[in-house]
Image (spheres, helix red, strand yellow):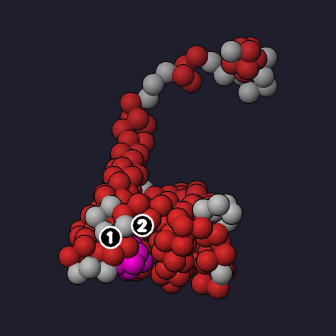
């Protein structure tokens, strides 16, 4: 409240209450981008719950679900820089498009994507080299029985998803770039397709129907991540995002 009074009465930028009046034209433009972006988050969250349910159908489901939770926690070490690059790519692309520089917007997106892939790939190397040691951090000295069942599953999770980590990085960053350009409809369909049409059915097929257990679910996760990254790149390369008006 103090800051608002200062802004309205004292600041050299002196605003007015008119600035707080709703502008429905802008509201519609914001919602045009915001709703599909929100749908993508809903798809990620609900598919994650569905994936956990599939993992709960494999032999020794408690160990498999524990391994999934630990694997996701460790993989979040790679998610964080990828998310940061995706957030950076959005304004870079949006500002350059607004300045009438689509080529520079594209170069910015690719630069962010490749840097993200390099950084997440570097983290993924540790997932390949010492997955058991990383998983062991989550177990104390008196949990030998549970760790014996869970650690190998976590190691398999990390190794399989390490392969897809660069694709995840590029896909995340390119989706951020597309969002900055206002192109959110096709990325939302890509998210739906790779998670709900590919990942979940394939996870059930490999893990439950064919009996590969939790490792089958990890394979489905890795393959769908690779596909998502490739589809995002393919759509970005069409250049349709250059002409979208928000």
The residue to which callout 2 is attached is 64
Q: Is residue 117 left or right of residue 226?
A: right
Specify the segment rendered in magenta.
Answer: 215-224
Taking the image as shown, residue 146 lies to the left or right of residue 52, namely right
Disc 2 packing (10 Å; few <14; some 14–19; many ≥20): many
Among the 4 quarters of the image, the one containing residue 10: top right
Q: For the point 65% across and 60% down, which residue is it? A: 142
Locate residue 20, reporting x and y percent: 54, 22
Give the spatial CA distance, label 2 vs label 1.
Answer: 8 Å
Residue 243 visible in the shown view = no
At horizontal 23% and vertical 81% (from top left) the residue drawn is 210
Measuring from the top left, give residue 45's x and y in whole percent: 39, 52
Q: Residues within 10 Å of mark 1 (few under 14, many from 20)?
A: some
Q: Secondary structure at mark 2?
A: helix
Q: Is residue 138 above or below residue 237?
A: above
Q: Which residue is mark 1?
A: 59
Is 66 left, or right, of 209 in this rendering? right
The residue at 28%/64% (across/down) is 57
């Amino acid at each position: 409240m103090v800051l608002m009074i200062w802004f309205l009465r004292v600041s050299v930028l002196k605003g007015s209450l008119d600035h707080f009046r709703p502008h429905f034209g802008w509201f519609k433009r914001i919602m045009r981008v915001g709703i599909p972006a929100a749908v993508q988050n809903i798809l990620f969250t609900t598919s994650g719950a569905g994936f956990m349910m599939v993992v709960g159908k494999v032999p020794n489901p408690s160990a498999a679900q524990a391994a999934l939770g630990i694997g996701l926690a460790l993989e979040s070490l790679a998610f964080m820089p990828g998310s940061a690059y995706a957030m950076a790519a959005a304004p870079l692309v949006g500002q350059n498009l607004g300045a009438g520089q689509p080529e520079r917007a594209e170069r910015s997106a690719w630069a962010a994507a490749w840097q993200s892939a390099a950084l997440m790939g570097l983290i993924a190397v540790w997932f390949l080299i010492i997955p058991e040691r990383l998983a062991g951090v989550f177990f104390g000295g008196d949990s030998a029985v549970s760790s014996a069942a869970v650690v190998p599953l976590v190691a398999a999770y990390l190794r399989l998803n390490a392969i897809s980590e660069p694709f995840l990085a590029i896909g995340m960053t390119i989706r951020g770039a597309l969002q900055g350009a206002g192109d959110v409809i096709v990325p939302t369909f890509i998210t739906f397709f790779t998670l709900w049409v590919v990942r979940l059915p394939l996870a059930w097929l490999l893990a439950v129907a064919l009996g590969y257990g939790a490792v089958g679910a990890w394979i489905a996760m890795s393959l769908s991540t690779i596909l998502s990254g490739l589809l995002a790149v393919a759509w970005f390369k069409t250049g349709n995002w250059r002409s979208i008006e928000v």
